[in-house]
Image (cartoon, rainbow, N blue to C red):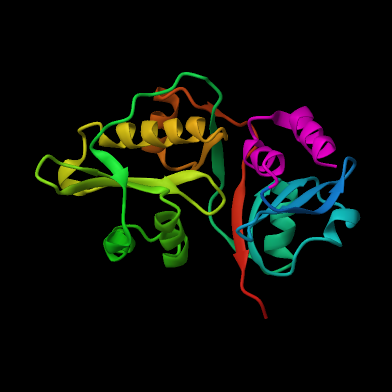
Amino acid sequence: MHEKIVHFLNSLDSTSYADIIDAVERKRGECIFFSPSSGLIWQHSCGTFYIAGEMNDEIAEHIPSSGLAAVHSPSISQYMLNEMGWDGSEATYLYVYNKHTVFETNSLIVPLTIDFLSFVTGHYNVSSDEDIRNAIENRHLFGMFSDKGELMAFAGFHGEDAMGMLTVLPEYRRKGLGELMEKHLIATCIREERKAYCNVFLSNIASCSLQEKLGLERGRILSWWIWKDPV
C-alpha cells in the first residue's frame, strides 16, 4: 500500500506532495482513504490530515468532520470550507530541498531548553504552545545566540516535520541570521535522512526569496491549511 501511495503522489508531482511522501515513506501516520482515481487522505502521527486529489463523491465520504488539515487540492479545500464549515487562511507554497549539498552548521546554534518556552510563545504565535513544547522536548527547536549569550533567532520543526517557526528578533534582523537558521534545519533533515521542506504563505515574499536563495524547489500545486473544532 505504501509503495502504491508514493508512486501515485510521484506521478502527480513529487515536489508538491513531498510532505505527504515523507510521512508515508517513514510511516509517520496511517492511511485513512486511498484510491488512484480519487485521491488520498493520510493522517500524520501528530494528528494532522493530509488530503490530495480532486473533489468527488468517493473522497467526500472519507473527509474528516473536524481537525487540522493540509489540503493539496483547490476543489477539496473549497468543498471543506464552503460545504463543511471548515476555516482557513491563504494558500501556501511547498518548498523542498532536493539537493544533497550539506550546509555547514554554526556552533552558535543549539537546541533550546524548556526554559525558553514562554519566550518563544511570546514571539511566535502561528503554532500552538503544545507544538512548540513538543519541538523543544524532541530537541527540534533551535536558537542562535550572540557571543554575549543573547538569543538572536530561533527556528525548528512543526509536529508534521515541516521546517518553520523561523523568527529573528527585531534588533538582529538584516544580518543573514534567518538564512543561517534555515541552513541548520536543512542540515538536520539530511542528517536524520528525511525530506527538508516548508510551507510558505503566498504573500510572504521575503520567505519565498529565502527559499529560492537556498536552492529549494517550489511545488506547482498549492496547499491550504484549514481547521475545524469538534462539535
In front: 103, or 98?
A: 103
Asked if residue 63 is positioned above or below residue 145 in the image, the reply reads below
Could you tell me which residue is drawn at 80 percent across and 45 percent down?
54
Is 21 contained in the magenta span? Answer: yes
Q: Is residue 13 left or right of residue 124?
A: right
Could you tell me which residue is drawn at 54 percent across and 46 percent down?
161
User: Which image quarter holds the C terminus?
Assistant: bottom right
**Residue 141 percent location from the top left of the image:** 38, 50
Q: Can residue 166 be seen in this snapshot?
A: no
Q: Is residue 184 left or right of residue 176?
A: right
In the image, farthest residue toward the bottom: 231
In the image, farthest residue toward the left: 148
Asked if residue 222 is positioned above or below residue 219 in the image, the reply reads below
**Residue 76 percent location from the top left of the image:** 74, 52
Asked if residue 61 is positioned above or below residue 44 in the image, the reply reads below
Q: What secondary structure is the magenta-colored segment mainly?
A: helix
The span picked out in magenta is 1-27
